[in-house]
């Protein structure tokens, strides 16, 4: 009987990693993501896998966010050499994501080893290198959506659009064990149906077991219209105060949605005179990939983006400035008012956004807008929860900037959309909830039982479930 063992994103939002074991196919890893929100010291210490990487026969990847793919280089460093199946767009995004993560990791490692040297301690060895990232890219087997691919011994894999970010996939895995077919569906991260850019998640009807994310299992998002109005109001108030706006944004997904919304506000004459700075080389590179795929996306109400006449980076937002070099980024600090800065990291765990915070978070004229999920333990979560002081670059800095949250920009489905998606299965599958904090998963499980008599399971780290 096939089994699933949960090695990450079990009653937590990051670190997606689920091991499917079967007689016919061996050991298959669904995602191999990094945990986010920890302190840098823990991130750069050796985080051992709780399984033998040499025993893994293949990886099936849902999408390119680091909490789903970030540990792939460590996996190959520890001996994995099998195929990694993903969508075509994910294969384009992975080099950008993994090389950026490597650069940040190496910088953190050097910083930590300098501290250790001052204390007479031995260096921490690197968990992986550029060579390992290149090996990951060599292992990629890109597939189009809705194409069943034979992966050995009668097993098939098929990807469906999850509507979360470019290339995000719902994974359908069909196994043939002991002459009996079993179908597993892994939702990956399901997208928010109320967006301008992404397609709605594909609805499936047939499965023996469904692994579904529950990041927002206990709440709903504001509507698209409400979110646009709230953003316009926040920007208008910030402009009237003579300040600047900082938006921490994930380079993949959230940045592109923001550019689309800001462009629409400008075209409606509602963006005042903001100068928009996309202060992230990675986000710029990712957006150029999105621009290639725009005709396959929803782009509702922005049809010019689907014709090539305009793209997110070209002829769309007239006040958009692309800041590639560090010198460009530092120059923004000289602007006293009217700068709207989009920078990473999305959870404020590092990157250029933290430098902008250092220069502006203590000024009450300024505004920080959070447009994405902030995991426990991140600077973003600390600010959203109302911190009066934060530690930045070793300094204690007072927080006087206005803190705003726009959850309508979420790239995750809200509670009602999650329930609707899983209720379309007609085969009464076993439902397992992952990728969510305990309260969110329990609330979602309660609703599923009340509304559809679905008895969902909520595994903990290390649990194994048969199907």
Image (cartoon, helix red, strand yellow):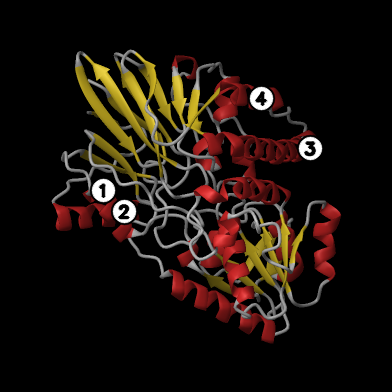
For image coordinates 35% across by 50% down, the residue present is 214
Asked if residue 364 shows in the view, the reply is yes
Q: Are marks 2 and 1 in contact (CB under 8 Å)?
A: yes
Give the label, 3 or 4, closer to the camera: 4
460, above or below 287, in the image: above
Instruction: Find numbered disc 4 in the image and state the secondary structure of the residue it sits on.
Output: helix
Image quadrant holding the C terminus, namely top left
Q: Earlier in the sequence, mark 3 or mark 4?
A: 3
Q: Which residue is mark 1?
A: 422
Q: Earlier in the sequence, mark 1 or mark 3?
A: 3
Residue 183 at x, y percent in the picture: 26, 29
Image quadrant holding the N terminus, namely top left
Residues 143 and 70: in front is: 143
Give the CA separation, mark 2 to mark 1: 6 Å
Q: Which residue is mark 4?
A: 134
Q: Label 1 neighbourhood size at 10 Å, few (<14), some (14-19), many (20+)? A: many
- Quarter of the image holding residue 139? top right
Q: Label 2 neighbourhood size at 10 Å, few (<14), some (14-19), many (20+)? A: many
Give the label, 1 or 3, closer to the camera: 1
Asked if residue 379 shows in the view, the reply is no
Is 60 on the left or on the right of 390, as rendered?
left
Give the label, 3 or 2, closer to the camera: 2
Q: Are marks 4 and 2 in contact (CB under 8 Å)?
A: no
Give the CA separation, mark 1 to mark 3: 50 Å
Q: Which residue is mark 3?
A: 114
Q: Which residue is mark 2?
A: 418
For image coordinates 50% across by 25% down, the residue present is 84
**Residue pushed farthest left?**
453
Give the CA separation, mark 3 to mark 4: 27 Å
Give the CA separation, mark 3 to mark 2: 46 Å
């Amino acid at each position: 009987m096939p089994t699933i063992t949960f090695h990450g994103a079990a009653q937590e939002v990051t670190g997606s990693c689920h091991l499917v074991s079967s007689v016919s196919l061996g050991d298959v890893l669904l995602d191999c993501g990094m945990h986010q929100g920890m302190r840098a010291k823990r991130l750069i210490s050796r985080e051992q896998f709780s399984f033998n990487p040499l025993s893994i026969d293949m990886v099936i990847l849902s999408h390119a966010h680091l909490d789903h793919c970030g540990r792939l280089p460590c996996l190959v460093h520890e001996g994995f050499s099998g195929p990694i199946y993903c969508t075509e767009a994910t294969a384009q995004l992975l080099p950008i994501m993994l090389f950026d993560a490597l650069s940040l990791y190496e910088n953190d490692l050097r910083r930590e080893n300098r501290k250790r040297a001052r204390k007479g301690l031995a260096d921490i060895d690197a968990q992986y290198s550029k060579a390992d990232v290149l090996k990951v890219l060599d292992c990629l087997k890109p597939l189009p959506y809705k194409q069943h691919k034979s992966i050995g011994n009668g097993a098939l894999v098929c990807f469906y659009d999850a509507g979360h970010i470019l290339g995000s996939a719902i994974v359908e895995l069909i196994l043939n064990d002991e002459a009996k077919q079993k179908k597993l569906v892994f939702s990956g991260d399901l997208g928010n149906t109320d967006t301008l850019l992404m397609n709605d998640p594909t609805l499936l009807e047939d499965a023996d077991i469904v692994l579904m994310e529950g990041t927002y299992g206990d709440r709903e998002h504001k509507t698209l219209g409400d979110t646009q109005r709230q953003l316009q109001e926040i920007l208008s108030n910030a402009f009237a105060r003579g300040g600047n706006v900082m938006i921490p944004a994930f380079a993949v997904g959230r940045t592109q949605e923001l550019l689309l919304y800001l462009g629409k506000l400008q075209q409606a004459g509602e963006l005042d005179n903001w100068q928009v700075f996309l202060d992230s080389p990675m986000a710029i590179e990712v957006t150029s990939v999105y621009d290639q795929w725009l005709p396959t996306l929803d782009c509702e109400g922005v049809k010019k983006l689907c014709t090539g006449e305009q793209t997110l980076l070209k002829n769309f937002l007239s006040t958009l400035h692309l800041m590639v070099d560090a010198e460009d980024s530092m120059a923004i600090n000289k602007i006293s008012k009217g700068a709207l800065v989009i920078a990473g990291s999305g959870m404020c765990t590092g990157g250029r956004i933290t430098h902008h915070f250092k220069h502006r978070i203590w000024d009450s004229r300024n505004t920080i807008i959070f447009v994405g999920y902030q995991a426990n333990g991140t600077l973003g979560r600390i600010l959203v929860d109302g911190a009066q002081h934060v530690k930045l670059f070793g300094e204690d800095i007072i927080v006087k900037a206005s803190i705003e949250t726009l959850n309508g920009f979420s790239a995750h489905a809200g509670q009602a959309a999650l329930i609707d998606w899983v209720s379309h299965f007609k085969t009464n599958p076993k439902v397992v909830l992952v990728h969510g904090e305990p309260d969110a998963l329990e609330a979602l499980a309660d609703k599923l039982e009340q509304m559809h008599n679905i008895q969902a399971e909520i595994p903990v780290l290390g649990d194994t479930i048969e199907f």
